[in-house]
Amino acid sequence: MGKNNRNRLHPKYEDPFQSPTANPKHAHNQVNGQSKQTYNDIVLQVQTRKRS
């Protein structure tokens, strides 16, 4: 229902979320529909690798 209405109102609109697992509400945390780590988590992971 919502997608058909959206296409009628905005015919040039393309959904940026091609993956069925992507959630537009969490788009700021996703890259290509997949979850990404925060910068702090990446730094923590690198530091723990250095220490071990």
Image (spheres, rainbow, N blue to C red):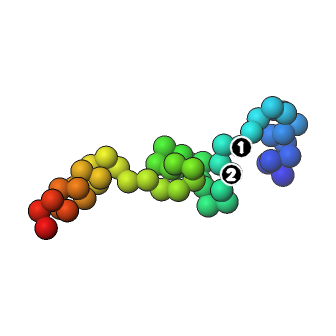
Q: Circle 2 sits on which residue?
A: 18
Residue under the point 38% across and 54% down: 37
Q: Position of residue 18 (x, y in %)?
A: 68, 51
Label 1 with label 2: CB-CB less than 8 Å? yes
| Disc 2 packing (10 Å; few <14; some 14–19; many ≥20) | few
Residue 37: numbered disc: none
Q: Circle 1 sits on which residue?
A: 15
Question: In the figure, 11 relative to 36: above or below?
Answer: above
Residue under the point 53% across and 56% down: 34
Q: Is residue 52 left or right of residue 35?
A: left
Q: Secondary structure at mark 2?
A: loop
Q: Is residue 39 left or right of residue 22?
A: left
| Disc 1 packing (10 Å; few <14; some 14–19; many ≥20) | few
Hey, what amino acid is under mark 2?
Gln
Q: Position of residue 7 (x, y in %)?
A: 84, 39
Q: Nearer the viewer, residue 11 or 36?
A: 36
The image shows a total of numbered marks equal to 2
Q: Position of residue 38 (x, y in %)?
A: 35, 49
Distance between mark 1 and mark 2 Cα atoms: 7 Å
